[in-house]
Image (spheres, rainbow, N blue to C red):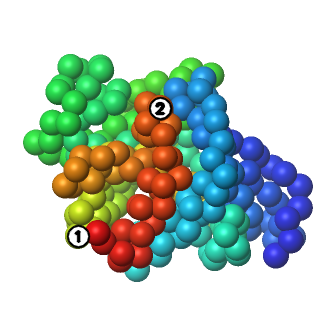
């Protein structure tokens, strides 16, 4: 499959057209960003690690009934994906309080939540991706049917159940994660974008060590080493 014109470049990926209008090529970049790209960096090999991690997790989810945009992985940095219209809502699923949730609501950092929390954020860098309610989603016409919001929540919770158990077996706490969804030409809602340490928080169950992009956000160092450890756990190499 040949890359054609660049259609979109985001913080972590580039999307290219192909000869098939229903398919795109996603390229995973080595770039690192935090705080809505106010902090920028790069880690050689990070893109390849995220591509592999996302490939493995999408395969797991697909095998358990979660439909995704992924068609196949082409090489270490590229995936062939279905062309979808991205719903401009970031679905954030939280099992443990940290980050913006602790700052907004004063919940103790590291406190396990009494139930899984699903939040919506507007996908808009210029507005710093603000948190939004269901009514905001309808007001802004982000979806054409309120029932779609319930589907997004249900899919977020389904992904959480599958991944939380999967990572628990590998001695990792799935603290929280962000996912995005798109609508294909048949009108089906598909999991899109990626699932990786860029979009998830993973804490080692025994040491509490952070193995995700917080290592970049908080200047902890060893970002690539942490991502490599997550991949090892996914592939079954548990310490």
Label at residue 219: 2
Look at 80% across and 57% down and name the residue there: 16
Number of numbered discs on residues: 2
Residue assigned mark 1: 169
> Image quadrant for the N terminus?
bottom right
Look at 71% across and 58% down and name the residue there: 27
Q: Nearer the viewer, residue 39 or 93?
A: 39
Q: Quadrant of residue 115?
A: top left
51, above or below 12, in the image? below
Residue 157 locus on image (x, y percent):
29, 55
Q: Residues under labels 2 and 1: Cα distance?
A: 28 Å
Secondary structure of the residue carrying tag 2 is loop
- Local packing at callout 1 (Cα closer than 10 Å; few below 14, some 14-19, many 20+) is some
Q: Nearer the viewer, residue 41 or 126?
A: 41
Look at 66% across and 52% down and name the residue there: 44
Look at 24% across and 63% down and name the residue there: 171
């Amino acid at each position: 499959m040949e890359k054609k014109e660049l259609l979109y470049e985001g913080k972590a990926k580039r999307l290219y057209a192909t000869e098939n209008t229903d398919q795109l090529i996603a390229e995973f970049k080595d770039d690192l960003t935090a705080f809505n790209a106010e902090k920028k960096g790069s880690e050689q090999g990070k893109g390849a690690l995220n591509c592999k991690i996302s490939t493995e997790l999408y395969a797991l989810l697909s095998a358990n009934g979660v439909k995704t945009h992924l068609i196949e992985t082409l090489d270490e940095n590229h995936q062939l994906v279905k062309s979808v219209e991205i719903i401009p809502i970031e679905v954030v699923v939280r099992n443990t309080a940290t980050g913006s949730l602790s700052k907004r609501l004063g919940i103790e950092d590291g406190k396990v939540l009494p139930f899984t929390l699903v939040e919506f954020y507007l996908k808009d860098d210029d507005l710093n991706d603000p948190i939004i309610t269901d009514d905001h989603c309808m007001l802004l016409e982000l979806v054409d049917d309120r029932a779609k919001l319930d589907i997004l929540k249900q899919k977020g919770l389904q992904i959480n159940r599958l991944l939380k158990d999967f990572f628990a077996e590998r001695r990792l706490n799935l603290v929280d994660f962000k996912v995005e969804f798109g609508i294909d030409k048949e009108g089906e809602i598909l999991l899109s974008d990626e699932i990786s340490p860029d979009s998830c928080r993973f804490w080692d169950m025994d040491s509490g060590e952070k193995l995700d992009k917080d290592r970049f956000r908080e200047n902890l160092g060893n970002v690539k080493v942490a991502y490599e450890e997550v991949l090892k756990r996914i592939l079954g190499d548990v310490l």
